[in-house]
Image (tube, rainbow, N blue to C red):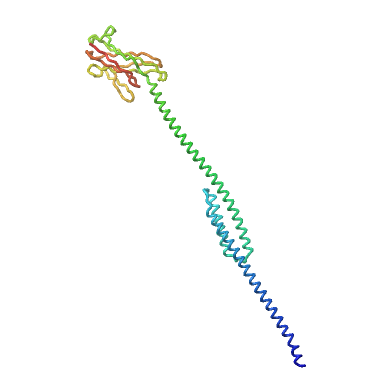
Amino acid sequence: MEPTVANNQNNPFKTTVIILAAVAVVLTAALLWIWIDRSALIDDLTIEKDQLTQQMVDLQSDYALLSSDNDSLNVQLERERLKVDELIDRVKKTEATNRAKIRQYEQELGTLRSIMKHYIVQIDSLNTLNTALRKDAAAARKEAQKAKQDFEKLSKTTDEYAKQIEKGSVVKGRGVRMVAINASNKETDRSSRVEKFRTCVHLVENSIATRGLRNVYIRVKGPDGILMTGDQQQIFEMNGEQMIYSASREVDYQGAEVEVCIYFQSVTGYVKGVYTVDVYTKEGKLGSADLLLR
């Protein structure tokens, strides 16, 4: 009977050992599950942090691509780029298990994205405006160039018209005739009887010529080709050239045809031969005529 009592006394201890062993197994299994679950959670959080970091890097690249011709806008863009750089640095220094901070950074990332979209719209608007302004400027330059060409063409045409008008306004002469007059004021062709020469010219009608007083000049040359003058040499200017003349007369020209006669008396007398007279105004030559004296 004694061995039976001993077995009964050992059974509670064995049962306790078995129970403790079972609890240890359960605890070990629980701890193992908790460790595995925590490791998986940490891995997930690490992946989430890496994805968040990559999104920030992508946003950083997107900001780097933004540019504008507007200096003020460029300053604002640079400020936002620095915010992204700072946020990336903060994320890298934060543990993946700090979920509160990670969520805060996600919100800040969303804000920076929204701001970037606003800048993109603003830059697109400015680019569209600049494109339109460039087109307008190009059109304005083209129009200005055309206006300049038209003005130059008009100026050239105007200058040509002015020259034509100036040329057309010059009074011309016709019917130049020189005769010799004797002491009785009659025409003669004998050199021994000549008292003076009379040269007549018709100033033709010209409606656009300047009205008023103007001088008509004659230059008489003897048979030897030498210019004949009075006691003193008299000079007039024609087209910037100074010329000596034999005699002149002032006439009131009003646009209608008018005859002008000018007398010249030589101080050296007259010889046989052909005499020539050239008639001028300051605007140009009116004509010439010859006279033969016997």
- Seen in the image, is 45 located left or right of residue 259? right
Q: Quadrant of residue 279?
A: top left
Residue 82: image x %, image y %?
55, 57
Outermost top residue: 184
Q: Nearer the viewer, residue 181 or 166?
A: 166
Q: Nearer the viewer, residue 125 or 243?
A: 125
Residue 107: image x %, image y %?
62, 58
Q: How many marks?
A: 0
Look at the image and tell me in which quarter the C terminus lies. top left
Outermost right residue: 1
Q: Quadrant of residue 196?
A: top left
Q: Nearer the viewer, residue 106 or 189?
A: 106
Q: Quadrant of residue 128?
A: top right
Tell me: residue 285, above or below residue 191: below
Tell me: residue 204, above or below residue 48: above
Outermost bottom residue: 2
Residue 1: image x %, image y %?
77, 93
Q: Residue drawn 40% across and 18% down?
A: 206
Residue 226: image x %, image y %?
24, 19
- Seen in the image, is 140 located left or right of residue 174? right
